Image (cartoon, rainbow, N blue to C red):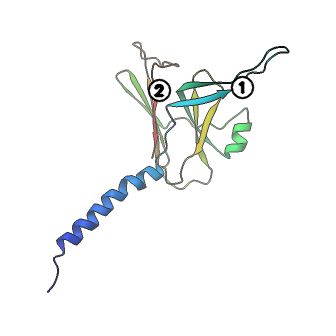
Amino acid sequence: MRKPLVPLLLAVAALSLSAAPAARAATELRCPSTLMVQAQPDAPSGWSPYPGKDSHPLVGVTIIEGDRAAQMASAARVTLAPDREVRRGRSLIQVWEFPGARKDTIFLLCRYRGTEATLAADLPRGTRRCTVTLELDARGEWIPEPKGPIQNECR
């Protein structure tokens, strides 16, 4: 007697659906919305330094092409301009497209308010698009230090 094929098909479909978010997460990259920075003060003679921790919100995302170590050491980084920008209400959505194979590394540089500390990560080779959503004021101008973290995503 043959067993029904429907339960097997449902099991395969369930497995493929549960694997999709994991596969997507492997190629998805976002700047963390905050950065914790350990500060170690340089104390003048006669003073005792005590370290502190500060949390800094995300205020900027830059997409850079080239070797990360070389680019971060350079004063003239090769930043990529967005391929297009779309205004929606009080938001400006910047979009970078990476349609085909690329020979150079592209990485994300995350900048945070009130600190020179940054985070950087290479985009996975399969990344096809990055978006950054910036807050605009009532006149439609970019707010360099928004109230909340900016939205960003690379897939």
Alpha-carbon distance for marks 2 and 1? Answer: 26 Å
Can you say whether 130 is above or below 138 in the image? below
Residue 10 in picture, x, y percent from top left: 22, 66
Q: Is residue 155 above or below residue 136?
A: below
Select label 2 or label 1 by which is in front.
1
Q: Nearer the viewer, residue 55 or 28?
A: 55
Q: Which mark is residue 149?
A: 2
Residue at the disc numbered 1: 40
Residue type indicated by callout 1: Gln
Image quarter of residue 147: top left
At 52% from the left edge and 19% from the top edge, which residue is drawn?
145
Q: Nearer the viewer, residue 154 or 94?
A: 154
Q: Residues within 10 Å of mark 1 (few under 14, many from 20)?
A: few
* The quarter of the displayed image where residue 109 is located: top right
Q: Which mark is residue 147?
A: none
Looking at numbered disc 2 in the image, what kind of residue is underneath it?
Pro
